[in-house]
Image: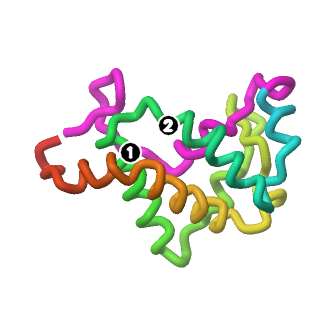
Amino acid sequence: MLTHPNTNRPYNPTLDYFLGGIEIYDQEETLGEQLWKLNPNNEQRNTIIKEHIIPHLQNLSYRHKFILTEKLEQALNDTNHDFENYFENNPNENYQIAWEAHEINTPRTFFEDIFHIIQDRWKHELYKAAKEDQSTW
């Protein structure tokens, strides 16, 4: 069974893993200020994904990336999946995404763009994992 990096817990990621690179709790004056200069609704979204989201996930193994990518693909194939939920901030938690759902024109498209970019960036790693027998992980 594939475990979460550096633990013995089973690796069962959720899509909010993709937003870790734009999570700004207690970093509003540093990372938050950087991100707020970018517009998540135009071509700057690619910069956000390439410079903040993907680097945040680079320490994952090719197997972890494969599982995470599959999870995203399943959600994208579900026409009823609520992508807005991932951009909801709860003031009672130590978690804050740079932009809330009402600031993202189409949260689904945001995740679609992530998917397309990681398909390209991680293509060799995803291919390697796809060739393996995942039941042996």
User: What amino acid is labelled 1 in the image?
Assistant: Lys
Tell me the element at label 2: helix
For the point 45% across and 57% down, the residue is 119
17 vs 96, left or right, is left
Q: Does the stretch in magenta take in 25?
A: yes
For the point 28% across and 54% down, the residue is 127
In the picture of the structure, the residue carrying the numbered disc 1 is 65
Tell me the element at label 1: helix
For the point 47% across and 34% down, the residue is 58
Q: Does the stretch in magenta take in 32?
A: no
User: Which of these two is toward me, 48 or 95?
Assistant: 48
Q: Main secondary structure of the magenta part?
A: loop
The C terminus: image quadrant: top left
Looking at the image, the residue that sits furthest to the bottom is 79
Mark closest to the chain's N terminus, 2 or 1: 2
**In this view, 134 is above or below 32:** below
**In this view, 82 is above or below 124:** below
User: Which of these two is toward me, 72 or 49?
Assistant: 49
Tell me residue 99's x, y (percent).
79, 48
Magenta-colored span: 1-30
4 vs 55, left or right, is left
Tell me residue 102's x, y (percent).
82, 60
**In this view, 89 is above or below 112:** above
Q: CA distance from mark 2 to mark 1?
A: 8 Å
Report if the CB atoms under discs 2 and 1 are less than 8 Å apart.
Answer: yes
